[in-house]
Amino acid sequence: MSKTDFDIHYVARLARLELGQEEEETFGRQIEQIIHYVEQLQQLDVDQVEPTAHPVPLTNVTRPDEIRDSLTNEEALMNAPAKGNGLFMVPKIVE
Amino acid sequence: MDCSQSLNSLRKQLLDGEITSKEVVSGFIDRIESVDSNLNALIHLDKESAQQQAQSADEALASDPEAKNKSLIGLPIVVKDNIAERGQPLTCASRMLSSFVAPYDSTVVSRLKSAGAVLMGRANLDEFAMGSSTENSARAITRNPWDAEHIPGGSSGGSAAAVSAGLCAAAIGSDTGGSIRQPASFCGCVGLKPSYGRVSRFGLTAFASSLDQIGPLTRDVRDAATVLNVIAGHDNRDSTSVPKDTEDYTASLGQDIKGLKVGLPKEYFIEGLDPAVKASVDAAVSKFEELGAEIVEVSLPHTEYAIATYYIICTAEASANLARFDGIRYGSRVDGKDPVELYAKTRGAGFGSEVKRRIILGTYVLSSGYYDAYYLRAQKVRTLIRQDFQQAFEKVDVLLTPTVAAPAFKVGEKSTDPLQMYLTDIFTISANLVGNCGLSLPCGFSENPKLPIGLQLMGRPFEETNLLKAAYAYEQSTEWHKTFPF
């Protein structure tokens, strides 16, 4: 099986996923196997084919720009891991 | 109470005054308490809420003449735990959401409530609907009600097991690559994936936004049509929901199917089909002929590329949809020295293996330098698959296939080989890529062990009426829907 360009450590960092050493090894192997499997799509000639992003191509689905009911402050904060003063508490971003 | 009764049979008894909603709900709760600790179909049951809703339903039936017009009044429905119900858990069978409580109702749940349903119990699933066996749940492994050593299918394994084991009147699941139809096939019940855009996705925890649909799992076809009537329809809150009128999906049930053109796609009748599946599906084809249908061989030439296409597209979409789980506004946060470390640790701790694999694969196929070779190419192959179906549907009205190539496999049999697991979806996956409607219903059993076999029917987009009519005609000429594992 030829080597792919897949670097699990790099991609996991892009996806903001911390993996253990064993996970990196196991998942790395498994995902390489899957990448090899999906390579079969290279066999097809798709030069003249339009991509389908969506099974039912609706266009310009809009609604009037009006204020509507939404969640209350309490509802929005209901599942917050950390909250205070009606706000989500987050780690400091700027020094 | 006979827990194997159909939803419509229970409804008739309720309206005739032979039974109360409280008795129906208690009957199912008793059964859940006696069998579900071995089955693990449900991950949450709010008994008090269910009994209160039953009480309200009985009061309404007694005092309000309009109550009987609500098609699900007093009937308990189990909902897959990735579909929001206000005030109830929405764990998606993930550690990430282990203490999450939904702040609002999904559109489907609102519609079920308006139809008078008793929302009873949250069904187990593969984590974030990613899986084909319900083994990826962070909570428990649901067992197949026909044989506990076998899986019930996935990702709506809890919903299918609950219906087939008689724990509820009906259940709601979601289907992205077969997650309603495949467990329905493995558990021996009816599972319907509506056409994409037929049922609102508002309040469904998104896995793959161009593939996901919510649908019913029931003990017979009429029940599925009854539930579809309640949940189908355009929704302003889902911009992918299609503004097409609904119809009464029960209206054509019982009409004959003489002259119906039934297509058998040759790529689905492969050498490797389990002999019991082949025998059951062949017998079903003969039954359709007896009922007056015309059997036509068709071809869907790009079938062999469907799994590869699906696993590029769904993982790409999943990587985007699951980016929201960062421990900031919700989720089980793990602290870090800075926000990026917080995200990585939170997501590393909160997600299970299959979810991580799919996010990583999806991130890869969308990443700079690889997008054209994988994601864009897969979208083009999706077009080719769609064209296959369009051409086939010019010759026939419905397509008939096995739902899965074999009956339910054993717990642990495929869980260490993700690719093997993915390959089990081969017959169901195209319907999601194309957006047409599909249904699985029982058509036989394997022997030693006795496990259900499912027949899949697929219809053109928005032709659920035709699909249900064909399914009903077959069902009523057999006894499979009256066979239960208890």
Image (cartoon, coloured by chain):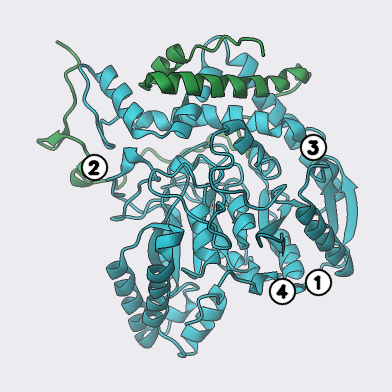
B135 displayed left or right of B294: left
Q: Is residue B288 above or below residue B328?
A: below
Residue B262 drawn at (x, y percent): 84, 56
- Label 3 amino acid? Asp
Residue A2 visible in the current orientation: yes
Discs 1 and 4 share one subunit: yes
Q: Crowding near pointer 4: few (<14 within 10 Å), some, many (20+)? A: few
Check residue B256 in the rendering and tell me which mark sits there, or answer none.
1
Give the drawing colour for chain B: cyan
Earlier sequence position, callout 3 versus callout 1: 1
Q: State the hue of chain A.
A: green
Q: Residue at x 77, y 56 (%)?
A: B276
Circle 1: residue type:
Asp
Disc 3 is attached to a residue of which chain?
B
Local SS, label 4: loop
Q: CA distance from mark 3 to mark 1?
A: 28 Å
Q: Is residue A20 above or below residue B396?
A: above
**Residue B30 location (% of width, % of height):** 38, 74
Please name the residue that numbered disc 3 is placed on.
B388
**Circle 1 SS class:** loop
Q: Earlier in the sequence, mark 1 or mark 4?
A: 1
Q: CA distance from mark 2 to mark 4?
A: 48 Å
Name the kind of residue labelled 2 in the image. Asn
Give the letter of the chain under mark 2: A
Report helix, strand or loop for mark 2. Answer: loop
Image depth: mark 2 or mark 4 in front: 4
